[in-house]
């Protein structure tokens, strides 16, 4: 017989009352939930939130302090005296998803175009990990007292032992025979700063050609030599070559203002922006004011309109500091290519650069059909470093981010293809199936155009769209290897990838690590691996 007796009132579990996010009641509950925790000033990320539609009685501006070491949180309503690390202007519903949604929901906030972000976007990746893992347990406590909070994010399932295909294991063993120090250096990073890696090394004088993949590209899926990781900013070099081709044809002057080729990009200081500034990252627009920060994967028409409305600060003359343009600069370059050639940027790169180089596995942008066919094996970026567990993310891995063109960023392809491109550049612009540039144009793009400037991320000398080895300026500015010649050119890819060609050594190296860590650690591991390549090939 069922027992229908009820429990005494005092023994019933207490269910917290749910309040609208950022209401006075919610803020009091947040103060109770964070009691005894205090983000440290030295390690706190300052997130400013500006609500576009705060409900009655709800704070419209908040400063959220997030300790990047412990995950401790603090919420302060009202105006802030200090400039936040990141400032987001968004709806009340989107703010709730930002704090309590899962990793995929957070990424999708940057795909509809209704969010505005100011500040250095790079910090958002590490904020995403802290919100996902909630190491201090604050968000779990606050979720129960937040009206309309989405369910807690489910952790990635335990995939068990990784099943490495035998041909991939054999390729890794063969690589270790030829490049023992290099493969040891790569294996040392597995499980520490990255879950997986893909490498291609070509040395023309000796005929050495090595490709290998290690570890996992996403939970439970092994990295293979055919996997298509995202290139991030290494893809900007394709856009630089597109400009070079149009320059050869006499269709553009890299010193000319962008408005000469895009009449709509004029007024409010836009007319002062030149292609040279974009390619050397020396315009007056700092990264924190990139108008596409919150809409890098939004529909193309919306991004074009955001650039029509952008203004250029007048306080800093161009060329006096490094102002890296991760999105807006290459979106403009893509628009110039389209205006001058008639083909869109993606088709132009595919037909004029990828095809002559034989880069058959690379996609400037995936079609929806391609994405759906391989979505479960596309490499994911994992946030690592900082003492917290590695966190798989959905950044640039959703269908919208993979199938909407993001110029200079979301190209996907194996490192062997990226190496084919740089091999063509090292060979004076001659690809496997045709020429992509004249030798003198390669020289013009990869020679030093920006000198005397250094930023906090170790960026120093620059060509037209290419990073140039600057080890002569000290360890902090060493890009690829302490043994690389000063004619070495290449690029980094948002603390995951690196590619370079050393014309003096006849060497091309393309490397992807799908663990994104902090700049200092990424630079250290890249230089360690780069040095090992030179040592293995006896180029030191």
Image (spheres, helix red, strand yellow):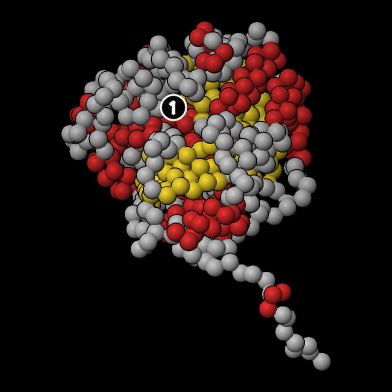
Percent from the top left, x then y, of residue 501? 53, 18
Percent from the top left, x then y, of residue 281? 37, 24
Q: Residue at x 47, y 31 (%)?
A: 233
- On screen, residue 10 versus residue 342, left or right, reads right
> According to the image, label 1 marks what residue?
237
Question: Is residue 488 in sight in this rendering?
Answer: no
Q: Residue at x 74, y 38 (%)?
A: 167
Which quarter of the rendering shows the C terminus? top right
Picture layout, residue 134 above or below residue 417: below
Picture layout, residue 390 above or below residue 523: below
Q: Secondary structure at mark 1?
A: helix
Mark 1 surroundings: few (<14), some (14-19) or many (≥20) residues within 10 A: many
- The image quadrant of residue 82 is top left
Residue 257 versus residue 191: which sits nearer the camera?
Answer: 191
Residue 9 versus residue 491: which sits nearer the camera?
Answer: 9
Which quarter of the rendering shows the N terminus? bottom right
- On screen, residue 523 versus residue 314, left or right, reads right
Q: Residue at x 74, y 89 (%)?
A: 4
């Amino acid at each position: 017989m069922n027992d229908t007796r009820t429990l005494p009132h005092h023994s019933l579990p207490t269910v917290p009352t749910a309040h609208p996010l950022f209401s006075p009641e919610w803020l009091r509950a947040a103060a109770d939930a964070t009691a005894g925790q205090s983000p440290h000033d030295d390690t706190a990320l300052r997130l400013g939130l500006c609500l576009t539609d705060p409900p009655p009685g709800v704070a419209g501006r908040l400063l959220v302090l997030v300790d990047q070491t412990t995950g401790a949180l603090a919420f302060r309503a009202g105006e802030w005296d200090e400039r936040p690390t990141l400032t987001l202007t968004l709806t009340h519903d989107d703010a709730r998803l930002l704090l309590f949604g899962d990793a995929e929901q957070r990424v999708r906030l940057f795909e509809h175009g209704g969010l505005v972000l100011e500040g250095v976007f790079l910090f958002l990746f590490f904020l995403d990990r802290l919100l996902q893992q909630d190491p201090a347990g604050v968000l779990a406590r606050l979720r129960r007292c937040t009206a309309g909070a989405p369910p807690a994010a489910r952790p990635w399932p335990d995939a068990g032992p990784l099943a490495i295909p035998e041909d991939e294991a054999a390729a890794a063993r063969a690589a270790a025979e030829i490049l023992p120090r290099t493969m040891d250096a790569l294996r040392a990073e597995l499980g520490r700063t990255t879950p997986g890696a893909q490498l291609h090394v070509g040395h023309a004088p000796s005929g050495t050609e090595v490709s290998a993949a290690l570890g996992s590209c996403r939970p439970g899926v092994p990295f293979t030599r055919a996997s298509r990781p995202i290139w991030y900013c290494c893809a900007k070099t394709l856009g630089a070559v597109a400009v070079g081709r149009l320059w050869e044809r006499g269709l553009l002057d890299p010193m000319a203002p962008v408005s000469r080729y895009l009449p709509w990009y004029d007024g409010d200081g836009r007319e002062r922006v030149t292609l040279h500034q974009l390619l050397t990252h020396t315009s007056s627009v700092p990264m924190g004011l990139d108008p596409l920060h919150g809409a890098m994967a939004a529909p193309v028409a919306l991004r074009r309109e955001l650039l029509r409305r952008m203004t250029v600060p007048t306080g800093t003359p161009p060329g006096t500091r490094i102002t890296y343009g991760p999105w807006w600069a290459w979106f403009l370059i893509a628009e110039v290519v389209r205006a001058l050639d008639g083909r869109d940027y993606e088709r132009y790169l595919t037909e004029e650069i990828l095809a002559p180089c034989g880069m058959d596995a690379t996609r400037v942008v995936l079609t929806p059909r391609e994405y759906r066919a391989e979505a479960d094996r596309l490499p994911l970026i994992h946030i690592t470093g900082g003492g917290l567990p590695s966190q798989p993310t959905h950044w640039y891995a959703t269908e919208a981010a993979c199938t909407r063109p993001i110029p200079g960023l979301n190209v996907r392809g194996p490192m062997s293809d990226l190496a084919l491109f740089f091999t063509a550049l090292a060979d004076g612009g001659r690809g496997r199936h045709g020429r992509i540039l004249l030798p003198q144009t390669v020289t013009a793009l990869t020679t030093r155009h920006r000198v005397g400037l250094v930023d906090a991320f170790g960026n120093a000398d620059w060509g037209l769209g290419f990073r140039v080895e600057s080890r002569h300026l000290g360890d902090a500015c060493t890009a690829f290897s302490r043994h690389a010649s000063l004619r070495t050119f290449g690029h980094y890819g948002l603390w995951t990838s690196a590619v370079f060609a050393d014309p003096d050594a006849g060497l091309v190296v393309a490397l992807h690590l799908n663990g994104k860590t902090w700049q200092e650690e990424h630079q250290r591991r890249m230089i360690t691996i780069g040095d090992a390549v030179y040592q293995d090939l006896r180029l030191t």
